[in-house]
Image: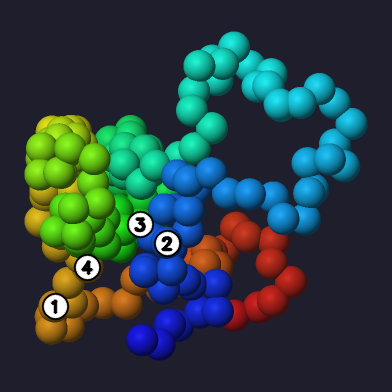
Amino acid sequence: IKYESSCQIAPKAFFQLLQSLGQYTADPLDILELVDTEKPLKALDFCYQMDSETLTVLDSISLCVTVISYAPDSERGHQMLTILDSILPFHLMHMQTLTTKKETPGGPRAELSMIHNISVCIKTLIYNCEALTRNFTGPQRTLDIRETSVKNLSPHIEIDEDSHSKYEK
């Protein structure tokens, strides 16, 4: 797959990156030791006190839906739709693979629960995005010959007998 810009990332690689945020990873370079503060690090804001330190793919899907629902016509809303479009199929395939390999604790019930959570997100997206359901009719060109819309910017001056113009008729 070729991408138009070097700033674009393959959807599968992006999904794998999001998936890695949901797992604890060791710090092989021991970078955290360079931070001079009490360990483990704590959130400064009270609203993050009880939050998990990991971000699951389902959390990412929920965040995308939240942004889209808030402003579906905005550029950010369109970007989140693109992200949702790229990660959702990979997440569904990943859940199916885990269930068939029997690696999911709880098996098919856990997969059913995750699908239910995704369906709630999609239902929210559908209810809050009426603007996305409208048909887009972009600018249309007609073949009618019309007068040019460019107008002469200089005012029309009529020279009359009472005018004190330097120029004579």
Q: Earlier in the sequence, mark 4 or mark 3?
A: 3
Residue identifier under label 2: 16
Residue identifier under label 3: 83
Judge whether 139 appears above or below 29 on screen.
below
Residue 43 position by quadrant? top right
The amino acid pointed to by label 2 is Gln
Q: Residue at the location (31% across, 41% down)?
A: 58
Crowd class of label 2 (few under 14; some 14 to 19; many from 20; radius 10 Å): some
Q: Are marks 2 and 4 in contact (CB under 8 Å)?
A: no
Spot occupied by residue 123 in the image (x, y as percentages of width and height): 12, 36
Q: Closer to the observer: label 1 or label 4?
A: 4
Spot occupied by residue 85 in the image (x, y as percentages of width and height): 26, 59
The one nearer the camera, 73 or 55, is 55
The amino acid pointed to by label 3 is Ile
Q: Gap in Å between the C-alphas at discs 1 and 2?
A: 48 Å
Q: Closer to the observer: label 4 or label 3?
A: 3
